[in-house]
Structures are given as structure tokens and as C-alpha cells.
Image (cartoon, rainbow, N blue to C red):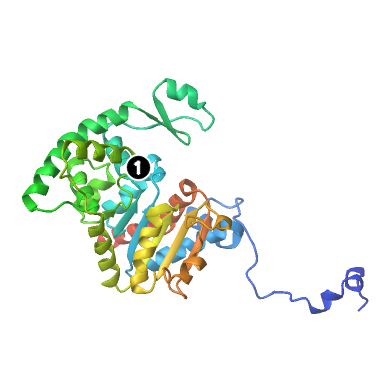
Amino acid sequence: MKKTNYEKNHKFMRKCVTLDNHTPVKGYDFEKEFEFDSFLESFSTTGIQATNLYQGIEITRKMIDEKAYIFLTMTSNIISSGLREIITFLVKHKMIHAISVSAGGIEEDIIKTLKPFVLGGFEIPGKVLFENGVGRIGNILAPYDRYLYFERFMNPFFDRIYKQQKIRGKPFTPSEFIRELGFQANNEESYLYWAAKNDIPVFCPGITDGSIGDLFVFQKQKRADFYIDAVGDNKKITDICLNTEKTGAIVLGGGISKHYVLNANIFKEGLDYAVYITTAQEYDASDSGGNQEEAKTWAKIKINAPSVKIKCEASIAFPLLVAGSFLKRYQKQDRNNN
């Protein structure tokens, strides 16, 4: 056979591997009648982050099927957004077993039971919003009056907690404090309510941050012997890891809520499954951007554990992951029960 010009000019073609036995890249065919499961399945062969997302769905299915203890870690903007409703669904139906969240994710769940946040825009000038008493969380608007409602809700709660602390002779851990807060909310739209009702621990290693941290300061000024036992929760989450055969984590964003769970799993030589959803990158060596391979060097994730980092913003990727994993298993269980 006569050689092509490409072969003549590129000697490396003689050693080129064809990869004919590998999976072809192929996206969804919209010429056919739309079917959501097939659409989601097509992500597996789409490439780029769509394929990583589908890997995350498959790993999450394994966590569920193999009855792993599932940690969900998240930054507070998850609760600021409409993802709160998805978190509530997961907690209500006991699909996850523990949560680690930053302080905003505690206070904003309560605030939303009192009055909602509203949609705005990313480009609204800060000066305009400040002068009108409105805070901005990306394109979500949080008028200051929400925090006045929150303080009014919290003051009698603090009175009750302080009295209970005196009776029991020891301070509450953050997760105990949050559990009582969930019961106090007594609102089925609240993920903290369902966590309290279903005995799902909610850890908040940075609970003194945010508006709730300000209220702790006010309490300390009012009552010098008011305390929160942060170390107690470190022992609690460590004991969970030590006494659980398999653990998995779904990590939304980074920060302290992510590391709190990863660090606790060092005590069992690492997570058995890990799915990261984040826009943080590795180049600055932050823990938020650190990938699963970095975590393996610290025994936060087992060396051979199924794991993936999905480089995508969570409000896009997380609903798809839940639809392809938790929801499918929930619907299957519901059909079997009926």
C-alpha cells in the first residue's frame, strides 16, 4: 500500500497506538424522544467534566449499595441557594448519615424558616445594596431584616440551652447544640429539623463564624460561664469513623467542613469512597482545591478507593448527581414497598 504524505512526514505514526478497543466519545442524541436516564447515561461517554460527573454518580451508587456511612460536607452557600431543598430531601429520607457544614449553613437554614432569601444579580453594586440594607451572596439577596428575625428566634433558644447546660453540668457540643436548634425550628422545610428528628449528626467545626458567632459573643457578654464544647465533636466524629466498616464522602466545595471529615477518616486509614464537586483548583495548594490524590497521601482516602473530583459549580452538578443516584434508589425502594 502506498504511504500517505502524513505517514512519510511523521515517523511517529509507525509506533502510533490506535486505541480501537477503547470507549468512543459520544454525546446524547436529541433526535430521539427525550429520556432522562439515557440523557444522564450519555454523560459517561461525553468527555470533559460530564464524564467525571457520571463517575461521581456511579461511585455514589456504590456507597449506597454497599451501605457505607455517608458524610456530606458543604459550604454555607449550598444552604443559601435552592440546594437546601435537596439537602432536606436527603436528610428527611435518611439517605446520608452525617453532615459537616460551615456556620452560615446553620443560621441560614433557620432564617429561611422565618423569611426567604430572594434572587438578585452578580453585578449589583455593593454600595447600592449596602445603602438599602441588603447583603448579597453571589446572585442571592439577603436583606438585613432576616438577621433581626434570626436573633429574635435565637434569644429564647439560648435561654433554654443555658438552663439545660447548668442542669447537665457541662456545655453542649456544636452537634448537640445544632440538634436542639433543629427541634426548636420544628419546620419540615428545615434540614436541621429532619436531622434532629432522624438522629443525623450535623457537625459545624467553625460554628463561631458568621451571624451565629456574633450571637455567641453576645451570650458570652451576658453569661460568662456559657461555653460550647468543640473538642467533644472531634471525639464524636472520630468514634464514628473508628466504629464504621465503610465510609464515603460527598464533598461540596471545600474549607473547614471538607477537611473536618477527611481528617477524621485518617483514624480508619481513609475514606472508602469520595466524590468532590468544586471549582477550586490544585495550583494554590489549598485544601479546598486539593484533589483526591493529594488526600490519599495523608490517608484521608484509601489508596484504591473509588474517587473523583468533578470540577463544576455545585448548583449545577449536585442535583444531577442526586437524580442519578439517591433518587433512583429511593424510587426503586418506593416501588418495592408498594
Residue found at x 21% / y 55%? 198
Q: Residue 212 appears in which quarter of the rendering?
A: top left
Q: Position of residue 243 (x, y in %)?
A: 26, 72
Q: Position of residue 40 (x, y in %)?
A: 51, 56
Q: For the N terminus, give its image quadrant.
A: bottom right
Q: Work out whether 21 lies above or below 283.
A: below
Q: Is residue 66 visible?
A: no
Number of numbered markers = 1
Residue found at x 8% / y 53%? 168
Q: Is disc 1 placed on a helix, strand or loop?
A: helix
Q: Residue furthest left?
A: 167
Q: Work out whether 101 lies above or below 215.
A: below
Residue type at mark 1: give it. Gly
Q: Residue 161 appears in which quarter of the rendering?
A: top left
Could you say which is closer to the camera, residue 240 or residue 166? 166
Q: Position of residue 21 (x, y in %)?
A: 66, 76
Q: Which residue is mark 1?
A: 104
Q: Is residue 261 left or right of residue 113?
A: right
- Callout 1: few (<14), some (14-19), or many (20+) C-alpha neighbours within 10 Å? many
Q: Is residue 334 left or right of residue 322?
A: left
Q: For the C terminus, give its image quadrant.
A: bottom left
Q: Position of residue 216 (x, y in %)?
A: 24, 40
Residue found at x 62% / y 69%? 23
Could you say which is closer to the camera, residue 140 or residue 230? 230
Q: Is residue 284 visible?
A: yes
